[in-house]
Amino acid sequence: MNHRTNNQELYLGIDLGTTTTQMAILDATGTVKVIPNMDGDITTLSIVSVAGKVPVFGKAAKPDKFLNPEMVAELFKRYMHVDPPPALVISAAGDRFPPVTLSSELLHFMKESAEKLLGCKIRKAVIGAPAYFKEPARLATKQAGLVAGFEEVHIVDEPTLAATFYGLAKGKPAKIAVFDFGGGTFDISILDVKEGGQIEPVAVDGDPERGGSNIDEVILQQVRQFVSQKGGELNPEKDYAEWLEVLDRCKDAKEALAHKDTAVIPLRIGNERTSMELTYERLKDLCAPIIEDLRQCCKKALEKAKLQPSEINTVVLVGGSTRLRFIPELVREIFGKDPVTDIDPDLAVARGAAIVAATYFGEPDREIIVEGRRYLASAVRPQTTIAARHLCVAAVTKKEQGDMKEYNVPIIPAGSKLPYTATECFTPIDAKTNRVLVKLYEGHADERSSNCTPLQEVEVEVQPTDEANNTDRIEFKIRMDEEGLVHIDVRDKLLNQPVPIKFKFHTGLSDSDVEEARKQLLARHRMPSI
């Protein structure tokens, strides 16, 4: 299968969402086009079923939620950072499916759909990731793309992708806030759209575990209380399929309340059919803690950007959950203006990903057409990304005060433009030790390290010495690349050479692991490699 059409190689832009996934390309004329999956759907549900002999996806997988619920995976994007990777589902054949494998299966389905539709092989892709995604999750997303069969994958923050599409579509400089509230994550990013369409991220905040699925759970708990008051029981341990059916009805009610004042949730309690009514105002009250979290994230992003709300020209909504009416209300409250409504919040990231894919992988003089406006690829490629959080090393910083606890010492400050390289020197507490444990955290400066979740722990072999030669002898060099991935080198200055390091936590797949996982994926689908 050829990888070119009309002598122009095509690259895929993918919005790999928690609940839905979309894709787009820049076609041979340079125009952005959203393309459907092989079932004809523009939006693919991020659902994978392993109930049959071959994994199935999207709407084809949905019936198995109720027939074989233990063999259906959803929301697996939320677990991409978990170490060790959990097996979220296990097939009848005994195959284990951790989050990376599930994501690679879904990405392979999208890739295969695009290739069949376009009639050419697609070798390279840009995949969006939440701006506030942790580094292990970014790495897992990239490797899932490689396992899916892409030869090259580039990870870009979803708000940057959405801002790229919007900025080029409008064609004028502006300070944009991208309010990205999807199925499972929330980002608020402030970006500067320059003359000519270049995008420069300014600040970011968010919550990688806050999304529309949290609202579904809030509604579900209300239904559970209602059923209990009627003498029934809604218990996932007793009837998981029933639990999932009711959860789907809760999602339907949430979507209805995006444009209605009242929704009705049909239920069965024993042999009796009944229903629970939910009003928009009641839903808004129930979601008050979620709304407050979103509000605080927006305020922190503005503080990081050192901007007043009035200095933001435009607020762009991204993600299907932004259709809930209290989101535009919240935007008006914080920013003093209505969000724009002239872009589809479900498709902005995929469209931006297609543009960035063409600028990243394609020829710099290629013409790109966005909403009738023409640009050169070299002029619109995003130049930088920024670190969402402080990347810190745990160190004993208050020894002179008798405090031997570890505190966060920032190595790469939040907001740093990427790629970023930093070098710090540390002193082993015991000069005669032959091993030093270096701990990496994403957190606040000077915060107790034990209060944070470790990103990585690195065991370093060092040469024992005396106190006179011990000071600042461990040189720790860390680089965060433009994809937000971390690379570590350690040198013992006493020996003047790099030293062996051993990682405690999962550091992703090796090249051979990726190749083996790809072979296993193809074997599951009984198809030859192309």
Image (cartoon, helix red, strand yellow):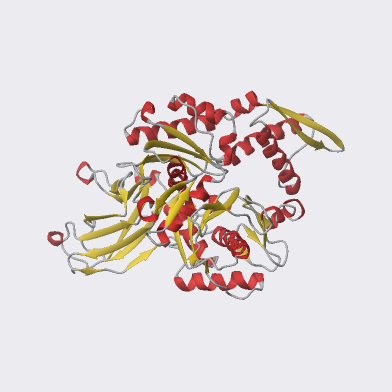
Residue 256 located left or right of residue 140: right
Number of residue marks? 0
Instruction: Report x, y in % for residue 21.
Output: 58, 51
Residue 184 appearing in the image: yes
Residue 186 located left or right of residue 449: right
> Considering the image in quadrants, where does the N terminus appear?
bottom right
Residue farthest left in this picture: 468
Asked if 13 appears above or below 158 in the picture, the reply is below
Q: Nearer the viewer, residue 8 or 101?
A: 8
Q: Measuring 33% from the left and 44% from the top, which residue is drawn there?
A: 414
Instruction: Report x, y in % for residue 382.
Output: 37, 50
> Considering the image in quadrants, where does the C terminus appear?
bottom right
Residue 308 located left or right of residue 104: left
Asked if 148 appears above or below 174 in the picture, the reply is below
Q: Nearer the viewer, residue 372 or 24?
A: 372
Q: Measuring 82% from the left and 32% from the top, which residue is drawn there?
A: 274
Instruction: Report x, y in % for residue 197.
Output: 38, 45
